[in-house]
Amino acid sequence: MLNTIKKHVGSAALLSVTTIALFACGGGASKPPTLNLFAAYKTFAEEGYFLTGVISGYCQGTRAQTFRRVVPGYTSSNPPVPALIQSVSEIDVLATGSSAFCQSFYRNPSFDVYFDPNTFTPMNDGSGLGYVYENQVALPTSVTAGSNGTFFTSKYYKNDNGERVLEFTTVNTWEVKADTATTLLYIVTNTATTLTNQLFYKSITTYRLNANNTLTDLTKNNQAPNLVTGTGDQNIYETYYQ
C-alpha cells in the first residue's frame, strides 16, 4: 500500500492527529508560523533519508525504510517523459506468529517513485500498472494552521493473467495543524475505496513541518477494514524514531 513522503526532511510517513495549543510568553496565545510546505517536500525528494520505527496494534514489529536521493531519468511511456526517480527499499521484522494479513502488508517491498521535476508531484511510471496518478496539485509554498488541500487521486491497476484490472481508487488529502511557536503538524490522509465504494484501507501520516522548511516523520495509523483482514476492522500504528 502506498507510502507517500518522509524525512528529517520528510517522506511516506505516519501518525496520530494532535493539536497543540500555543502560548506566548506573558500568557497570550501566539500566532502559528507560516512555513513552506513545497520546499520541505522537495527537500525530502532531493536528499532522501533513512527511516526506522516501531509497529504496534494489530501488527507488531519494526520497520526500516531507505529513501535514496532522486536521480534524473525517464518514464517507460512512449514517448518517455523526464522524471526524478527515487528508489525505496524496506526491511520489516514482524513478531513471531503474525497473521497472514500482517505478513502480506509488511512484505519488505522495493519500488521506485517518480516525481515531476518542476512540481514534485507523483508521476506515473508509464507501465500502466500499480498506482496511476491523476489530478496532481503541487503543495503550496506558504501554509499555516488550517491550510488543507488534495495532493492527488489515483487508480490502482493489477495484472490479472495478462489483463490490466482496476482494483481500487485513492484520494490523498493533507491538512496543517498548530504545533509549537515555530513548527506545524502536516497530516496526510490516503483513503482507498473499492469499485463498490467500500473502504479498502486508510492511512493517516503525521509529520512535523520544521522552522527550516523540512519534514520529520512522527507517526502513522493504517486502518484496515474487515474486507481485507477477515478478522474485523483493525488499526496498525507506526511510531518513528527521531
Image (cartoon, grey):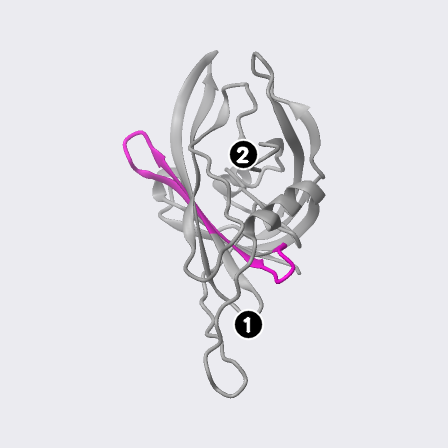
Residue 126 shows in this picture: yes
Highlighted magenta segment, given as a residue range:
188-215
The quarter in which the C terminus is drawn is bottom right
Q: Amino acid at mark 1?
A: Ala
Marks 1, 2: nearer the viewer: 1
Give me the residue at 46% from left, 79% from top: 29
Q: Residue furthest bottom?
A: 26
* Residue 112, position as x, y percentages in the image: 63, 31
Give me the residue at 27% from left, 31% from top: 196
* Residue 35, position as x, y percentages in the image: 55, 58
Q: Residue furthest left?
A: 196
The reply, left or right, for residue 107 in relation to residue 66 is: left
Instruction: Give the residue at mark 1.
Output: 181
Question: How many callouts does the rendering have?
Answer: 2
Instruction: Give the residue at mark 2.
Output: 122
Badge 2 element: strand
The alpha-carbon separation of the residues under discs 1 and 2 comes to 31 Å
* Residue 53, position as x, y percentages in the image: 63, 54
- Pick whichever of labels 1 and 2 is earlier in the sequence: 2
* Residue 81, position as x, y percentages in the image: 59, 20
Residue 96 shows in this picture: no
Give 98 or 35, whichever is nearer the viewer: 35
Give 9 or 234, whichever is nearer the viewer: 9
Q: Is residue 175 above or below residue 80?
A: below
Residue 80's mark?
none
Neighbor class of circle 1 (other Cα within 10 Å; few <14, some 14-19, many 20+) is: some
Q: Amino acid at mark 2?
A: Pro
Give me the residue at 67% from left, 34% from top: 87
Q: Is residue 20 above or below residue 27?
A: above
Give 182 or 196, whichever is nearer the viewer: 182
Residue 33 lies within the magenta run: no
State whether the magenta stretch is mostly helix, strand or loop.
Answer: strand
